[in-house]
Image (cartoon, grey):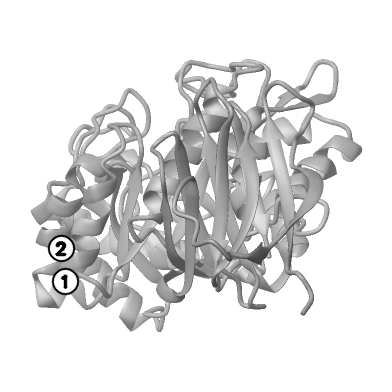
Amino acid sequence: MNQRKIRLIQTEQKSQDRLTEKPSLSFHADENGAENQLINVYDDLAYQEIIGFGGAITEASAVTAAKLGKANRDEIIKAYFDAEEGIGYTLCRTHINSCDFSLGNYSYVEKEDPTLESFDISRDKLTLIPYIQQAASTAGDDFLLYASPWSPPAWMKTNGEMNNGGKLKPEYREAWARYYVKFIEAYEAEGLPIWGLTVQNEAKAVQRWDSCIYTAEEERDFVRDHLGPALEAADLARVRLMVWDHNKERVYDRAKVAFEDAEASKYVWGIGFHWYSGDHFEALSAVHDRFPNKGLVFTEGCHEGGVQIGSWKSGERYAHDIIGNLNNWMSAWTDWNIVLDEQGGPNHVGNYCDAPIIADTKSDSLTFQSSYYYIGHFSKYIRPGAVRVASTKYTDKLETIAFKNVDGSIAVVVLNRTDEDVPYILRNRDELAESVSPAHSIQTLLF
């Protein structure tokens, strides 16, 4: 009987390993019934199916890329969305109207016009849509695009501006619902099918940038009475609608309000969440246990406070969060901006952040951060349609996740955020393979 081989892909702080293929491992029979140092993988016990991994293409990302030469502009897309030469992204988020990572506030209907006859996406056609189209072409048939509004047009809001919170005026709920429909139709006319929508980015946060506040009940009622019926009337019920799109500490509370109302719930496919209030992984399982038919999607996360070139902790934070979310029923994951400039922008209110790829627009060069490689250990090897399978580990010094891909291959990710090398023995189907997880490393094992 031939020994099963295990491919080992590794990224490690103290070496030059960056998604580097190491010498393969081999399984051998568990003749003595090993008990210690085990990572067990039980591929006969299945959980959720993966939709995909991806990132956001914002106006900031597209404008930054446009300032580069063609080679680097193309390299960014290839690095993310090419399954062979990149890390295999298939999911993309973008914004409806402006967000903070736009060059300024803008909407598709600038002056008061409840008929929406003046609806115009021409600004998006300058750089944003072409860059999304390039990503879609590179990713191929698995590409999925979803969109989120940060704010309605200023004239629809109680505070008369797109920034600083405010609420949607009651008299414009119907027009705002039709606005989403107009957006979908306009983008699909550009060859970009819309897979999903979130109702509102960060519905609880009054931000100094584009923002709009909904209580859980207001969001539920808007979906039930306006947005859901508008999508249905336009034959767009296929679009996956997600509520909340904010942090995990209240994901269960918001899910209850939206999903316990049968009339609202019938329009809502799932719930989106961010990471800015902490781990709260168990909150995702609480939502799944109470509402097992609803999707759980990570819609945004980034490192705030500008560019942090060389930070290793950023990659580790990403991997820790992805593993925790996946082990608690997350089915899709989306990073924030795929690329930002040397300042961590552009951002029209100076809310600069980090990104996995930083572009120096002055020298036309790219820096790949640790986060790029850490994300790639998941996105490149856990493919759309993969199903999470059961796994256990002997120590909390390691964080692990296991998936079975559509082709039958198993992908196991092992994360070590400690300062010491940690030995382990991979165990599957009564066979063993010994290995070591180096300090501050991440490995993907494929067999």
Q: Is residue 135 left or right of residue 303?
A: right
Residue at 67% of width from left, 24% of height from top? 13
Q: Amino acid at mark 1?
A: Ala
- Quadrant, the N terminus: bottom right
The image quarter containing residue 236 is bottom left
Q: Earlier in the sequence, mark 2 or mark 1?
A: 2
Relative to 209, residue 273 above or below: below
- Callout 1 secondary element: helix
Q: Amino acid at mark 2?
A: Ala
* Residue 310 point in image, percent of width and height: 66, 17
Relative depth, front residue between 400 and 141: 400
- Real-space CA distance between mark 2 and mark 1, rounded to the nearest whole angstrom: 6 Å
The image quarter containing residue 164 is top left
- Callout 2 secondary element: helix
- Quadrant, the C terminus: bottom right
Residue at 81% of width from left, 16% of height from top? 362
* Residue 319 point in image, percent of width and height: 51, 40
Relative depth, front residue between 218 and 380: 380
* Residue 90 point in image, percent of width and height: 63, 60
> Mark 1, residues whose alpha carbon is within 10 Å: few (<14), some, or many (≥20)?
many
Residue holding disc 2 = 258
Residue 264 shows which numbered tag?
Answer: 1
Q: Is residue 44 left or right of residue 343?
A: left
